[in-house]
Image (cartoon, helix red, strand yellow):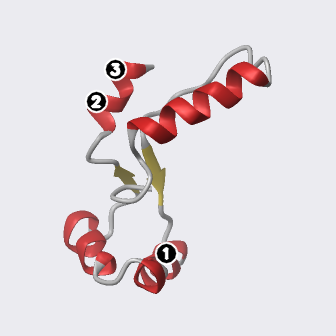
């Protein structure tokens, strides 16, 4: 999730699990997530439960976007 766990440490951890599971390939569409109408409103309520103030950051950054890219998308994509 942008601003929470879209970072190098988690990406390398994910890739390590893929190696252990003998994954043959990964379909990669970017370090992002999609928020459809309805799920977006639910999602925007949740961050403040564990990360106070993050809801406002999400709303000001992404507003009503369907695809929300991590601010680290470009850097993390280079790792893959």
Question: What is the quadrant of the C terminus in the image?
Answer: top left
User: On screen, 61 above or below 75?
Assistant: below
Q: Secondary structure at mark 1?
A: helix
Residue, x 50% and y 41% (percent of image)?
Answer: 10
How far is disc 2 from disc 3 in space, using C-alphas?
Answer: 5 Å
- Are the two marked residues, 2 and 3, in contact with CB atoms closer than 8 angstroms? yes
Within the image, what quadrant is residue 54 found in?
bottom left
Q: Earlier in the sequence, mark 1 or mark 2?
A: 1
Q: Earlier in the sequence, mark 3 or mark 1?
A: 1
Decide: few, some or many residues near mark 1? Use Cα within 10 Å; few <14, some 14-19, many ≥20.
few
Q: Which residue is mark 1?
A: 43
Within the image, what quadrant is residue 7 found in?
top left
Q: Which residue is mark 2?
A: 75
Q: Position of residue 30 (x, y in %)?
A: 43, 35
Residue, x 40% and y 83% (percent of image)?
Answer: 48
Residue, x 42% and y 40% (percent of image)?
Answer: 31
Q: Secondary structure at mark 3?
A: helix
User: On screen, 20 above or below 43?
Assistant: above
How far is disc 3 from disc 1 in space, using C-alphas?
Answer: 28 Å
Q: Position of residue 24 (x, y in %)?
A: 73, 14
Q: Which residue is mark 3?
A: 78
């Amino acid at each position: 999730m942008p601003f929470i766990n879209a970072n190098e440490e988690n990406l390398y951890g994910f890739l390590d699990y893929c190696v252990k599971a003998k994954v043959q390939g990964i379909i990669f569409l970017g370090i992002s997530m999609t928020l459809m109408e309805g799920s977006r409103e639910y999602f925007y309520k949740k961050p403040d439960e564990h990360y106070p103030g993050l809801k406002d950051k999400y709303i000001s950054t992404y507003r009503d976007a369907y695809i929300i890219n991590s601010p680290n998308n470009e850097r993390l994509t280079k790792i893959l």
